[in-house]
Image (cartoon, rainbow, N blue to C red):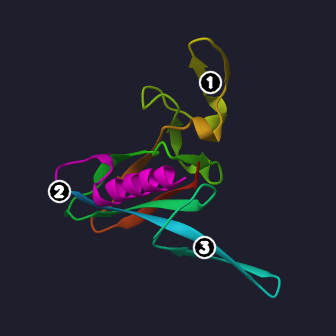
Amino acid sequence: MRKLTRNVMTAMVVLAASPVLAMAAPGAVALDSSIKLDKVTTVNGQTTHQFVAPEKVVPGNHLLFVTAYRNTSDKPVDHFVVTNPVPGAVALEGAGADNFEVSVDGGKTWGKLAQLTVAKPGVAPHAAQDSDVTTVRWVIPVIAPGASGTLQYHAVVR
């Protein structure tokens, strides 16, 4: 369990410290990635969710991966694509997955999860599941000068 925790933390540090793959004119769009732990608290029967910086994660923890973007240029950016790998130590949680495309083969093919099939040697092809997702992708038609926004997905530590 320690190794898994360390691997997830390493993946989180790498992902948070380096920008995700994006396609735009150099310097036109600034990206900032972060990862938050979904800390669930129940007091007097009322449950609250607080998203905090993770200090330690263990299997079963729920995480929120966020990429903030901002057009820093004075021109609109058309057809902006952000591609974000899903670290192997986590599995995508399907909530909100209709807001982006996914890949189950490292980015070779893309689509909505319900449309994809997983084919592995020696195993019968099967409908893709949340745990099969390797990469998520958003396509933003236009980002106006100075405009900003956030892209996010939820995952659970394996």
Magenta stretch? 1-27
Confirm whether the magenta stretch covers residue 34.
no
Horizontal side of residue 1 vs 135, given as left or right: right
Q: Quadrant of residue 13?
A: bottom left
Residue 112 appears in the figure: no
* Residue corresponding to mark 3: 39
Q: Which residue is mark 2?
A: 27
* Label 2 or label 1, whichever comes before in sequence order: 2
Disc 3 to disc 2, C-alpha distance:
35 Å
Labels 2, 1: front one: 1
Left or right relative to 40: residue 26: left
Q: Amino acid at mark 3?
A: Lys
The three-letter amino acid code for the residue at tag 2 is Gly
* SS under mark 2: loop
Question: Which sits earlier in the primary sequence, circle 3 or circle 2?
Answer: 2
Tags 2 and 1 in contact by the CB under 8 Å rule? no
Q: Which disc number belongs to residue 139? A: none
Residue found at x 29% / y 54%:
19
Q: Residue furthest top?
A: 122
Q: Kindly indicate whether the residue at mark 3 contacts the one at mark 1 (C-beta within 8 angstroms).
A: no
Query: Element at badge 1?
Result: strand
x and y percentages locating residue 36 in the rendered image = 49, 67
Query: Which residue is located at x 28 percent, y 55 percent?
Result: 18
Numbered badge on residue 117: 1
Q: CA distance from mark 1 to mark 3?
A: 33 Å
Q: Position of residue 120 (x, y in %)?
A: 57, 18
24 or 121: nearer the eye? 121
Crowdedness near tag 3: few (<14), some (14–19) or many (≥20) residues, C-alpha within 10 Å: some
In the rendered image, the vertical position of residue 54 relative to residue 129, given as above or below: below
Q: Residue 121: horizontal and vertical position, in percent? A: 56, 13
Circle 2 packing at 10 Å, graded few (<14), some (14-19), many (20+), is few
- Residue displayed at 45% across by 61% down: 66
